[in-house]
Every structure is written in C-alpha cells, then in structure tokens.
Image (spheres, rainbow, N blue to C red):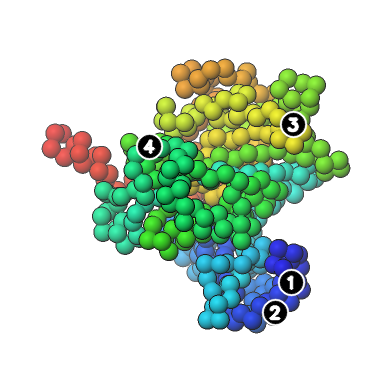
Amino acid sequence: MQERSLRTADDAARLIQESGLSHIKIGLSDIDGVMRGKYLRKDKFAAALGSGLAFCDVVMGWDSNDAMYDNVQFTGWHTAYPDAAVRIDPATCRRLPLEKDANGRDMLFFLAEFDGRAAEVCPRRLLHRVIAKAQDMGFDAFAALEYEFFMFNETPKSVREKNYRGLETWTPGNFGYSVLRSTVNSDFYAELIDLTEQMDMPIEGLHTETGPGVLEAALAYDEIGRAADKGFLFKTFTKALAERHSLMATFMAKWSHDLPGQSGHIHLSLRRRKTGENAFFDKGRPHNMSAAQRQFVAGLQRYLPEFMSLYAQTVNSYTRLVPGYWAPLDATWAIENRTTALRVIPGSEKSQRVEVRIGSADANPYLALAAALASGLAGIEQQLEPDPMVTGNAYTQTFPEHQKLPATLWDAAQRLRQSDTARAMFGAPFVDHYAATREWEEREFRRHVTDWELRRYFEII
C-alpha cells in the first residue's frame, strides 16, 4: 500500500502492519508553528487512529522557548496542564527518509491536530474551519507558499557559543539566481529537492536570493489545507536536513540589520465547487480580474491591519517592515507590483491569482493561510470594493490612515483582539488565546536589554 493513497484509519492501520516498523512518528503545530511530536509504538498508534490519543495541553500553553504563558485562560497552572484530545490525520502519511530503523526501513510520519475543546485554539483546525466556510460559500481554495531562508556554516552549539554574533554564512556576498553557487553546492540542493519530493512537499522553484547564503523555495500549489501542511513540513525538515550537514537554516524574519528580511509569500486562488472554474478569472474584465477576485482583494486589503499578527507573529517580524527592503508598510494592492502588500497576477483561467506579500518566513503557515482566506471570504460576503490600486513605487507614496499596518507586535495583537470579523471568522476562544500569546511575546522582549541600547546609551547618556 502506498502512503500517499491513504484516506482512512483502516488504510493507515494496514500500512503500519505491512511496514514492519515498531514505532511511528507524529507531529503537530503549536501556536508559533513549531512542530511538536513523539514516537508511538505501533499498537498504541493503531489504537489512536480509531480513538485518538492524549497530549499534554501545555503545547498550547507555552512559547517557542517552552516558557509557560501567564496570561491565557485555555491552559496554565490554574488548570494544572491536563491532557487534551489529539487526532491523527491518516491522509497525511509520509515516508521520512531522514530516519531509518535498524533494518534500514524509512520511518513513517503522520500529522496530528488537537481535538475537542483544544480544537478551538489549534492552528490546523482553525484553517480547516475557514476552509469549511469557503466550501459553504461554494469555493475550493488553493494556495502556494514561497519561503526565503538563510543558510549558515554553523551548528546549534556553535551559534550559542558565539552568542549569535559573527556567524559564518553558507556562501559569501550577494549573488541572486546564481548558477555558480547552486552548482558548487549541488549535493545539498539535490538532497533537499529529493527530500521534498519523497515527502510530498515538492519545490516548484529553488534559487539563491540576493544576500549571503540566502535561498528561496517556491512550493508547488495545492488545495489550501494540503499547502499549509507542506509549508509546515518544509520548514521543519529543511532545518533537519541542514543540521545533518553541519549547517543551519533560519526562517526568522530578519537576522541582520544589514540585510533584507525573509518573506513568506502566499499565492491564493478560488475555484467554484460546482464547475471547477477559477473564480478569479474573467477574460471580459480588466486584467482578467473577476468581480469575485476584486471583492477577495478588497477583503484582504480591508482586514490586513486587523489580521497582521497572524502574518507577522514575532517581535522580530516587525524589524523587516521598513522602507526599501521589499516589505510593504501599508495595505496596498496593484497589478504585478512587488512594492505593494497585495499583488494581483493576471493570467489564464489556470493561473489568475493574488499574492499576499506582507508575511514573513517565520509565520505559522496554518495561521497565515487562515488569515488570508478568511479576509478574502469576508470581502466576498460583504461585497467590498478595494481602494484605488497603486501605480509605481508604493514605498515613496503616502496612503490613507486606514491602510496603515501595525508597527509592533503589541499593536497588531490589539487590532486582532478588537476585530469583530476575526471573532466571527476564527472564534472568540482562538482570538483571545492568540492575542494573549502575542502580548506575552512582546512582554518577554521588553524584559531584555538589546545590543543597540548598550552601544547607544552605555557611555554617552
């Protein structure tokens, strides 16, 4: 039985029996998009396929550094961190060629998600609730993710010994789209490409970006739920492959003030469920842009300021949003314009789409895609019209106050918390929990003295 053909728990149980493996690996997303998981003995895994399993809900109650939130209601010391229900999705089975058992057999890997009450704050379940809304409205949503990431000749130990200073990038200098670099380092490129093919998260395009050691990978488009899974898997296992080569990959939004930040662009389209036609394409309208696409873009534009914390989830995300570094500062849109937050890409019935350029590579793909899809659907529901589109360089122009994006994570969290549309689309439990986690993240940052402050104030002030 091929793992990609699995659809049911019975299918998965048969594959596990045939595999000869003693243990199976599962992974799920926490709030920050960090993959958490464990190995399960095959008999326990088989039982969990039917009845689920228990997972400590601290996974939704701590930050990316495993520090417990002190400001959330869902879980905490006040609830004593009980177990939460988790379900395994049999359709997500993949071979994991980076891991083999003692007999040389590839590990089997499945994605899981929280269930029951914990589903209210689970990122993967959130996206699937928005997908269900799209389906109720008569649409199937499709997406593709693009990630920029820097590579270093470092290890987890060496970066800590260096206190994250003086790090050696994988390659020197600026050399975008370099055939020389990709040829010299072709062994790693080949392994990465092969890994993504085997794990069903294929790379459509891979190249160097301008900057020392930076790559950009465009993942193949798919139904939006599967696209999110692929982005989630790609980030984790790209880092795993790099570390096996004594390299490190980082997806943080901006690691150096001297270099551009790292984006996580989203390409989106809708298809009508009854006909399969691209709902964004209308060859009789300017730029082939249908009424539905205009409304979708209007929703994206209208709710970008309110949903910003879902696209830019860390304190570091906002250091990327500065003029002149390919990161938009306002909720703007245009046709084929890479200086705006939203880029409409005219094309054929197959390729007409919109690109959301505001997100950074550090975003949780489930949350970023949920935000983009929900805001576009709200635009269709509310029959919104976008503001006038931008012509020319958006970085040099002034826009209305309502298009301004939050400048800090704290401000972005407040906009989300106060958003009636976010509560309608995502549910109050998620909005309250997520906003509190972002407020925690900002408070943690404020507890620390930065190198910039020391250099600026230590002697002079």
In this rendering, is residue 386 above or below 10?
Answer: above
Q: Amino acid at mark 4?
A: Asn
Please name the residue that numbered disc 2 is placed on: 18
Can I make out residue 430 in this image? Answer: no
In this rendering, is residue 51 above or below 317?
Answer: below
Tell me the SS state at disc 3.
loop
Residue 188, percent across and down? Answer: 46, 56
Please name the residue that numbered disc 4 is placed on: 174
CA distance for labels 4 and 3: 34 Å
Q: How many marks?
A: 4
CA distance for labels 2 and 1: 8 Å
Is 328 on the left or on the right of 294, as rendered? left
> Of the residues under marks 4 and 3, which one precedes in the sequence?
4
Please name the residue that numbered disc 3 is placed on: 348
* Image quadrant where one finds the N terminus: bottom right
Query: Which residue is situated farthest in the left direction here?
Result: 459
Do labels 2 and 3 touch, CB within 8 Å? no
Tell me the SS state at disc 2.
helix
CA distance for labels 2 and 3: 44 Å
Residue 67: quarter of image: bottom left
Q: Amino acid at mark 1?
A: Met
Query: Which residue is situated farthest in the right direction here?
Result: 274
The residue that appears at 30% across and 50% down in the rendered structure is 167
Q: Amino acid at mark 3?
A: Ser
